[in-house]
Image (cartoon, grey):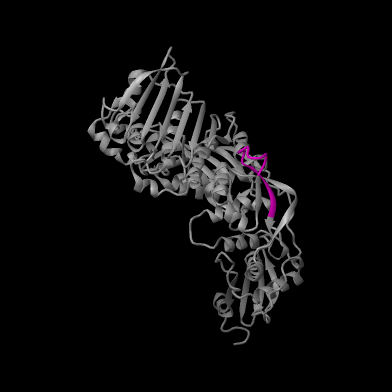
Amino acid sequence: MIRRLDPGTRSKIAAGEVVARPASVAVELVENALDAGAETVEIEVDGDGTDRIRVADDGRGMAESDAALAVERHTTSKLSAAGDLETVETLGFRGEALPSIAAAAARLELTTNDGGPRGTRVVVDGAENATDGEHGKTVSPAGRARGTTVEVTGLFSDRPARKKSLASPKSEFARVSAVVTRYALTRPNVRFGLRHDGRETLATPGTDRFADALLAVYGRDAAGHASTFESSREVSAAGETTTVEVDGALCHPEVTRSRRDHVHVSVNGRALAEPRLRRAVADGYGTLLPDGREPVGVVRLRLPPGWVDHNVHPAKDEVGFRDADAVAEAVEASVRDALSTADLRRSGEVAMDLDSSLAPVEAASVFDDRRVIGRFRGLYLLCEAGDELLVVDQHAAHERINYERLREAVESAGIDAVPVDPPATVSLSPTDAALLDANRDLVEKLGFRVAEFGGGSGSGTYRVEAVPAPLGRPFAPDALADVVADIATGDDADPRDELLKDLACHPSIKAGDDLTDDEAARLVERLGSCETPYTCPHGRPTVLAIDEETFVRGFGRRSGRLG
């Protein structure tokens, strides 16, 4: 039942009334559909979303009296008093979605049916009319099966400054796609469909299987290299103990991305871009992840409503916890335990031949007088250098060598591209596909040539026909997603430089790769010839030095060998 909120409750939820961009509308309407028990949610977006957003569901729907009241301010079916904010279990609990959207749009049309012989259509025209109980709102009978459809047109039509502040249409759609993808993965029991300008970009089957949702979003490689898990952990705060239930699906470490955006989390059913929880998931992988890589996975938390505060972020991207550190530790431990029992054997072997790497930099090596005397844990090379012991991170060192040679080649001759024969098929998530469309010119300038598989089916599957190949070293076709993410960050970084950093990293020696004495010596010599030998391209140190005085003090000696 829709009811009016009292003034005290209104004051506590005012932050939720902001409709900042089309993705905000998508969040509110999708969450309302899920709260209504929908088994199917279909989203349609025209242009950047300001032209039209339509969300249809097969949930419970509303009677005529509730539908007419739902578009008025300070009404909701999800709260009755301010105290309910502390124990709310619904998603769109702020209750201001429809009138706030109507206030920002030229037109809002709501068509709904609670299962009766006929449905109801409510139309609100004009921004000022959402606050008026009679003028500007029309209510009429409508034919519709059980459920609700909301269509919003002309968003921000009377707010030119807000509309001008939006990004490009394809970038704004990418934000909407990210919201829908997040829910499609964390709610695999619900069928989601997303269409952009009439083209289907996402469709999940609603089978309640994480593998099926991952297949729809990321393709066969990710779905085939993922393990589901369930875990329960006790956490305590202020003398009270409760249980955190954690479940989801984790892709194996061979399926990674360059950014953490592909860690999808939800809390009590609400899908979030929660940085603390995403970090906890990544920390659970520990050393299983290659340097600079982030996992792909879905992790859901459930804990008592009183332990969660959903009213801390206007965009609903984050939540508060009674003890955030304890919850994060529970997530990290659950992920770590799940991965410890999964079959994580790598499907390919790492190339170990240093001579297949780039030629050494043409410069004298600052490490000419350094002698490799050993290795430690398959990670570090130990070198004697006068009265110092140098410890070289072999992966960081190889990255630096590769990067500088690539950079030199690109500066002198540009980025060459080579054809992929036959073309490789690469699956992108709907969000990455939207980002690719928004940045296609730049992607092609970097050396990729990409065509949609099936001639524009919108399936998220692409045919990579050419890849960048500086110095004849071809980029892997499946790195397309990383490149798209890197150039879409919006910062001032040179996308060519980011590309070279990725290319330098992928073929580099990894932790645990055993080198022969000759290979270790050549690696140190080539590192010493680099322009910046003491850091990798991402800024991590390549070499640490321990002077002899450290050993003298540690062993309680009077002096060193030479003293």
Q: Residue at x 60, y 42 (%)?
A: 250
Residue 368 quadrant: bottom right
Residue 10 quadrant: top left
Q: Residue furthest left?
A: 7
Q: Is residue 293 visible?
A: no
Q: Residue at x 31, y 36 (%)?
A: 127
Q: Is residue 234 visible?
A: yes
Q: Which residue range is magenta in the image?
A: 452-466
Q: Residue at x 71, y 68 (%)?
A: 358
Q: For the C terminus, which image quadrant?
A: bottom right
Residue 292 quadrant: bottom right
Q: Residue furthest bottom?
A: 563
Q: Is 487 left, or right, of 12 in this rendering? A: right
Task: Give 379 or 115, whichever is nearer the viewer.
Answer: 115
Residue 111 falls within the magenta-colored stretch? no
Residue 465 falls within the magenta-colored stretch? yes
Whether 123 is drawn above or below 425: the answer is above
Q: Residue at x 55, y 50 (%)?
A: 282
x, y (%) of residue 38?
48, 26
Q: Is 117 left, or right, of 392 in this rendering? A: left
Task: Give 226 or 482, whichever is nearer the viewer.
Answer: 482
x, y (%) of residue 18?
34, 41
Q: For the N terminus, which image quadrant?
A: top left
x, y (%) of residue 67?
35, 23
x, y (%) of residue 316?
40, 41
Whether 396 is drawn above or below 155: the answer is below
